[in-house]
Amino acid sequence: MYVGGCLCGAVRFEIKGKIGNIVYCHCSLCRKAQGSAYASNGIVASTDFSFTSGEAVLTGYESNQGQTKYFCRHCGSPIVSKNIAHPDQVRIRLGTIESAISEKPQAHIFVDSKAEWDQICDSLPQYSEYEPNR
Ligand SMILES: [Zn+2]
Ligand SMILES: [Zn+2]
């Protein structure tokens, strides 16, 4: 079980299952959404994810057709994104999880969009766009 929440504390959530497909996404949308060099995202089953408080405080932005990023309207913390093509899964922003995470990042994706000031210093696989077999 993982727990987490937004910066101001209004939004709280829990994850009952595993976090899969953890990647560092360097795409331009993720960089803007996070205000950082990349986003650290993982995928959890929709049935394993639930808000324990503050769901009404979330607001959403449809950054791609069918894909909406949800964030806290008070503090701006990005929490999850959902894609209507994949209703069975929720993409979680790992930085909002407070529990120790046992799963490890698997790859850097969209490195062709990487910020020129960002240097990748680990040995994880790097993919120009999505990693294969996603
Ligand atoms: Zn908040
Ligand atoms: Zn991205």
Image (spheres, rainbow, N blue to C red):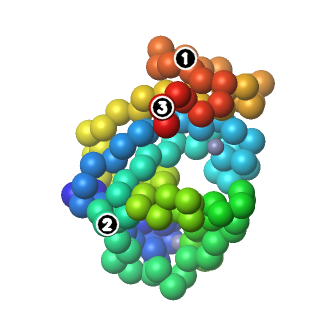
- Residue 131: x and y in percent read 54, 29
Q: Residue at x 37, y 54 (%)?
A: 44
- Residue 45: x and y in percent read 35, 58
Residue 121's disc is 1
Residue type of the residue flagged with mark 1? Cys
Q: Residue at x 30, y 44 (%)?
A: 101
Q: Where, by quadrant of the figure, is residue 63 drawn?
A: bottom right
Asked if the residue under mark 1 is in contact with the one under mark 3, i.e. CB atoms within 8 Å, the reply is: no
Residue 47's disc is 2
Q: CA distance from mark 3 to mark 2?
A: 23 Å
Q: Is mark 2 within 8 Å of ligand 2?
A: no
Q: With 38 as the anchor, is 105 left or right in this view?
A: left
User: Can I make out residue 31 in this image?
Assistant: yes
> Which sits in the foreground, 111 or 33?
111
Which quadrant of the render holds ligand 2? Answer: top right
Residue type of the residue flagged with mark 3? Asn
Q: With 52 as the anchor, is 37 left or right in this view?
A: right
Above or below, comparing residue 44 to residue 74 in the picture = above
Who comes first in sequence, dot 3 or dot 2? 2
Q: Which residue is identified by label 3?
A: 133
Above or below, comparing residue 33 to residue 112 in the picture = below
- Residue 12: x and y in percent read 39, 72
